[in-house]
Amino acid sequence: MDRDSDGFLDTIYFGNVAGHLFKTDISSANPAQWKTYQLYKKEGLHSAPQASTTIDSISGNILTLDTGATGFNIHRNVFGLTSKAMGTIDAVDSVKSNIVTVSTVSPSSFVAGETLVIPSYDPIYLAPAVFFDKGFNLWVAFGSGDRTRSRTNPDSGKFMALRDGTTTVSASTVQKTDILLSDLVPLTWTGLTMDPTDIKVDGKWGWQFTFPMFGNGEKLFDPEPIVLPDLNLIPHIYFNTYQPSTEETSSECDAPKNGIMYYYDLACDYGGAGTVGGYYESGRIAGGGVFQGTDYIIYQGQGEVASIPPLQDIKPIKLIYTGSLLFYKEKKR
């Protein structure tokens, strides 16, 4: 991001597969002065795991878990709390479900007697959207979800927006870091809509919600979130999610079943009314990725990931605000 509009990037925002979000300040001409901050810290990776058990014994890459172990299914990532070894479950014994085959993906090896967990993480795969509101507060909006194991990981993703700002520590003004989920206002949905909710709350640094179709593991999907202002200069955040199909196939040769796409439109009016609200629907994709004058391309599909709309359904949509556009997110060419 080019915060001072001098033609040079000075800030980089990025997430990782553990669910943390970072900011790197590269504004100095001296790389030795560049600094990276952890803006958002995902808690409970290992302290509040999806599943936890003890490794009773190990033979090669076959682990025998405690007989009461549940949730250790194929394709799940596992982590040893003592050895710090990481791996993926490749197979589960069809008779004794506590016997699993694990491929190790770290230099360390699992050890008998240690606690084995399935980490509770929300991977961030897409670039965040960075924008200013009407009050010139800087926001970073991003979503999460396990895209690589969308069907086998039942957890739903989240969407959240953080204010990138400073705080006072020991009479000094410093970058606000390590924002936690508890530091964000939780939002709720009523059907397909979210009523305007107050997000100007003391001690809070933004807002968050779990995707409403959490029963089937809804995750953030392409493209990355898009932010555009309306006539009142209220930034609207547009993004898509994917809900995997719950249908199973009995043959590896069968094509995967179609999932459902959802389209979201959220108005973040922190700099005005101090609220956020919006709606979601199925059957659309937020953006084709290019501006064409005052037109923005979107796809009008059928709501199924595998459906490709005919050319006549790829429609240019007029932007609501056609004056001197305020570019809330900039891409260098």
Image: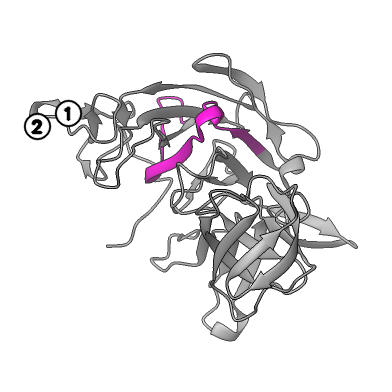
| Percent of width and height locating residue 148 | 43, 52
Query: Are discs 1 and 2 less than 8 Å apart at CB?
Result: no
Q: Which residue is mark 1?
A: 315
Say above or below: 93 vs 289.
below
Which residue is at 57% across, 66% downward? 87
Q: Quadrant of the C terminus?
A: bottom left
Quarter-wise, where is residue 309 in the image?
A: top left
Name the amino acid type tagged 2.
Answer: Leu
Which residue is at 34% across, 37% downward? 249
SS category of the residue bearing label 2: helix
SS category of the residue bearing label 1: strand
Mark 2 neighbour class, 10 Å CA radius: few under 14, some 14 to 19, many 20 or more: few
Residue 17 part of the magenta-drawn span: no
Front position in the image: 26 or 188: 188
* Residue sticking out furthest to the right: 170
Residue 21 seen in the current view: no
Q: Which residues are magenta?
A: 207-233
Front position in the image: 140 or 221: 221
Front position in the image: 81 or 22: 81
Left or right for 71, reference 252: right
Name the amino acid type tagged 1.
Answer: Lys
For the residues carrying marks 1 and 2, which lies nearer the camera in this image?
Answer: 2
Which residue is at 49% across, 16% downward? 192
| Percent of width and height locating residue 136 | 57, 43
Front position in the image: 63 or 38: 63
Which residue is at 54% across, 83% downward? 31
Residue 147 seen in the current view: yes
Q: CA distance from mark 1 to mark 2?
A: 8 Å
| Percent of width and height locating residue 24 | 57, 68
Q: Looking at the image, how many numbered discs can be counted on the residues?
A: 2
**Which mark is drawn over residue 311?**
2
* Residue sticking out furthest to the top: 191
